[in-house]
Image (cartoon, helix red, strand yellow):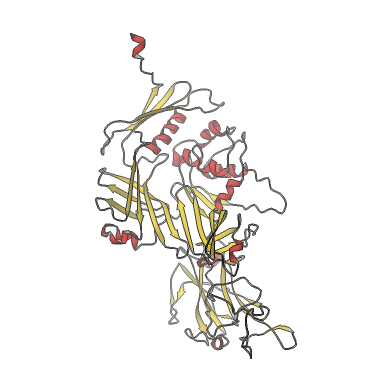
Amino acid sequence: MIEKKYVINGFRQGRINATSPEIVEDKNYIYSEYIRVKFGIENVLSAISSTDKILVVEIIKYSEASLTARTNETLNKVKFIVVQLRHQDRTPLKPEDIAECTVTSGFPWSIDANGELYYCESTLKMPSEIMEKPYPEALWRVDNTNPDIPYHRLFPPLLPFFLSVPAVAQNDYIIIYDKNTAQDDFNNNGMAVLEPISCTVTENFNADWTVTLEHPIDRNQKWKYIKEFNILKVLGQLFTIKKIEHSWSGNSGKVTAYAEHIFYQLNDRWIFKGADIYAESGYWLIRSILEHSDTKHQSGHISYNFNFYSDITNETVDFDMSTIAYYKWNPLQNAMTPVEMLLGSDGFTANFGGDLYRDNFYFSLNEHMEHHLENSFDIHVGLNLHGIRRTVDTAELCTHFTAYDKYGSGVSVYWDIHGGIPHHIVRSQEYNFGDNYEESDIDLIGHEAQKYFGQHMEPQIEISVDLEDVRYNPDYAEFANNPRYKVGDRGRIYDERLGISVDSHIVRTVKDGLSGKNLEITFSNVTGFGNFGDYDISFEQIAKPDLPENPAENE
């Protein structure tokens, strides 16, 4: 295949009505001037953003060609095109957000009667005699079970009579890449476009994001690419294969791959005991964690770089973050991975809160998840639970908590119980703040009290919605017909049986990796540092509580 590339530029704000020359003012779109092109047998329209956002690009106008009859004959008559772009998330787009936009036209190779290899700018002719398998791949490939799916071969298939011109939407396919793929080389079809039996994507709030993929043992041998450490692209996100299983039933077989989001390659790094982690803000804490992460890098090995952001500061947590870092992580008492330091029981999110957002090689920990929606749902859980799984867990509930240090100073935090809780559930804990802690710091103790209480002050309420079953429940029909819900979106849940209303967010989605549709959504009340909702919370500075006397000692 010989390729010719045409660079598209001259973008302007707005969009064009495809059925008329009318230009519509629209800050979410940009369009190009007329670009002269010559279409080949394969034409790919692509755009690279200068930001981290995904672009949607399409051809909206032709000159001297039909918009409906896209035959090879009419394609040869195309002389000019107009291209229109927008962000996938439909946020505003400006011309300067485009790093590159191109049309690449491919022209076929052929072999003449003398065995000479050349390319031509027209459709290859059918052979004069009927051919039998195996077909000579150096001439063409006609044994293609699904011609609509792109392939990764040196020579193209025999051309159809009708050719679709719009760009290949890469994110619609499930692609597999080699484990050593360069960080800037995931914008193509990799080693193969897979044809899986099934693919499920499960994302959990501030936790794992995984893919389970089943692929047939196919005659095109794409299944051989499904190996440990190779990388899948599913719904636009990259996932590292961590485990595979092969199984057979009769004459057919399949390979099952289990993969985790590319973010978790940070788990392959290590922060050694004794590291000095500093935290002037959320951003500097993440930076310090990554700077102290050891990769043991060797020449020629691939180790990806991650961009990051955080809007969490001393003001958002109402505490000097550097004080926490000084007492807890200078030096670091236990070795761990960067992910444990970010999301673990005594890491970033445990001490300062934060919602984790991930987009391939970028992540953020913000007070609320990046790109989330507020007030996106209002759920009233009554008696009708068809298609709903309701879980109320009080095992870790605490309504009165006291934190104290080794010197006996402490802080209690509690709320006036209601909503069916019969009495206070009392807990306390002594905290060791390390060798630097030489005298009581009430602010630091109070911070630990807030952290624990914010995680345990309410029953854990989860509402899981099966979107296939819920369509038959009129109380929850909106979830079956609304695909926009995503992890991190916030709203309210009123539980009629408990008689309480709680702040809630989406903590889990299960998607079909083939169609992108939500299969299941799980809602849960918001817990964590400082999340006290509408409760009337009381704080009290106290001395270390005395133990009750042993009655046996008084006899």
**Percent coordinates x, y for residue 303 in the rendering:** 64, 52
**Percent coordinates x, y for residue 201 in the rendering:** 47, 57
Q: Residue at x 44, y 55 (%)?
A: 371
* In the depicted structure, whether residue 157 falls above or below residue 361: below
In which quarter of the view is residue 222 placed?
bottom right
On the rendered structure, is 284 left or right of 25? right
In which quarter of the view is residue 46 placed?
bottom right
Quarter placement of the C terminus: top left
**Percent coordinates x, y for residue 314 in the rendering:** 48, 39
On the rendered structure, is 272 left or right of 32? right
* In the depicted structure, whether residue 258 falls above or below residue 196: above
Q: Residue at x 38, y 23 (%)?
A: 542
On the rendered structure, is 226 left or right of 371? right
**Most foreground residue, 398 or 141:** 141
Q: Residue furthest toward the bottom? A: 128
* In the depicted structure, whether residue 267 falls above or below residue 329: below
Q: Would you say residue 361 is visible in this rendering?
A: no
